[in-house]
Amino acid sequence: MIKVNLLREQTVHVHKTETTYSNAGTALIFLAIFAIVAGAVGGWWYYIAKDIKTLTASRDELRIEDARLLGLKKQISEFENLKSQGQSRIDVIEKLKEYQTGPVLLLNHVIQSIPVNSSMWLTLLDQKGDSIHITGYTLRNESIPDFMSNLAATNFFKSVDLELLEDTKEAAKFSLVCVGATKLSSE
């Protein structure tokens, strides 16, 4: 059987459209712009990441330096505290030195008058009015005249006299009687 299309003239001719790539140039331009933007963003991201690393390392160094400086500040504060305590002690000592009277001055003069390397020790220091009695021992007899000379040189005593000298095999016992140059108070 044969079929014939008698209505052929009534059919519409449909033209096949050919695909053209006229939009390909625009797509390439967009692709190039995207590549440039992506490269710029990537470069910017790399630069920012590098800056973050540098700034983080710098921050860590600064934190370490800050901790070191805080430690030094604490040490300075402690040293200043010790300095102020030392200065207050020095002030108290100087004040006490200014207010020294009578027995303290007497002891200072007697102690300063003991000859160096004399092997001398005192056993009694008695004060009654302006009369002072000093008793002690020495291993070397020649240190007694030095002691008496040193006492007289202080100008704290009017006179220094030897009252007793007992020489034994081990040590010499001596006793001195001194008269104070000024009235000493035994307060």
Image (cartoon, rainbow, N blue to C red):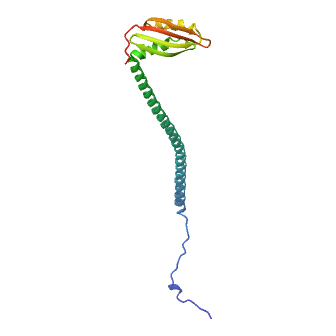
67 or 134, which lies in front? 134
Q: Where is residue 154 in the image (x, y as percent from the top left)?
A: 45, 8
Whether residue 184 is situated above or below residue 93 in the rendered picture: above
The quarter holding residue 140 reads top right
Q: In which quarter of the image is the N terminus?
A: bottom right
The quarter holding residue 118 reads top right
Q: Residue at x 46, y 15 (%)?
A: 125
142 or 62, which lies in front? 142
User: As drawn, which residue projects farthest toward the bottom?
Assistant: 1
Q: Which residue is drawn at 48% across and 16% down?
A: 124
Whether residue 9 is situated above or below residue 52 in the rendered picture: below
Q: Position of residue 129 (x, y in %)?
A: 38, 12
Whether residue 39 is situated above or below residue 93 in the rendered picture: below
Q: Residue at x 46, y 33 (%)?
A: 78
Quick check: 56 left or right of 1? left
Q: Position of residue 127 (x, y in %)?
A: 42, 14
Q: Where is residue 156 in the image (x, y as percent from the top left)?
A: 42, 9
Quick check: 138 left or right of 79? right
Q: How many dots with numbers?
A: 0
Q: Quadrant of the C terminus?
A: top left
184 or 29, which lies in front? 184
